[in-house]
Image (cartoon, rainbow, N blue to C red):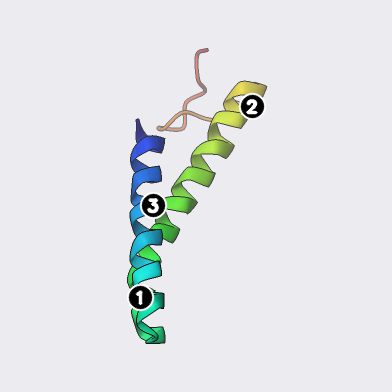
Amino acid sequence: RMISGLGMVWIVGREVYAYGYSTGDPKKRMWGAFGNLAMMGMMLSTVRIGCHMLGWHGPGPFGHQSCC
């Protein structure tokens, strides 16, 4: 669900960027910059799930080793 939400935010960010680009004013292109944050979130989530699938478990959220 998180990736779906981030994907929707990224799409909206691209649409806002395209609108700003079409105005011809370079400053308005920055309006769509929030889409880059969503892209970074999707990339980090992909790396995290890849590490999980490979069995590379790190310490838990409070410094404890994961039990499984």
What is the residue that sits farthest to the front in this orientation? 22
Q: Is residue 24 above or below residue 9?
A: below
Q: Label 2 belongs to which residue?
A: 56
Q: Which residue is pictured at 39% across the width and 68% down the height?
A: 17
**Structural distance between the alpha carbons of marks 1 and 2:** 42 Å
State whether residue 68 appears in this view: yes
What is the residue that sits farthest to the right in this orientation? 54
Mark 2 / mark 3, whichever is N-terminal: 3
Location of residue 3 in the rendering, given as x and y in whole percent from the top left corner: 41, 37
**Structural distance between the alpha carbons of marks 2 and 3:** 31 Å
Q: Label 1 belongs to which residue?
A: 20
**Amino acid tagged 2:** Trp
Q: For the residue labelled by badge 2, is the local secondary structure a helix, a strand or a loop?
A: loop
At label 3, counting other C-alpha atoms closer than 10 Å, the crowd grade (few under 14, some 14-19, many 20 or more) is some
**Amino acid tagged 3:** Ile
Q: Label 3 belongs to which residue?
A: 11
Q: Which residue is pictured at 33% across the width and 40% down the height?
A: 5
Q: Which residue is pictured at 41% across the width and 32% down the height?
A: 61
Asked which quadrant contains residue 6, the reply is top left
**Amino acid tagged 1:** Gly
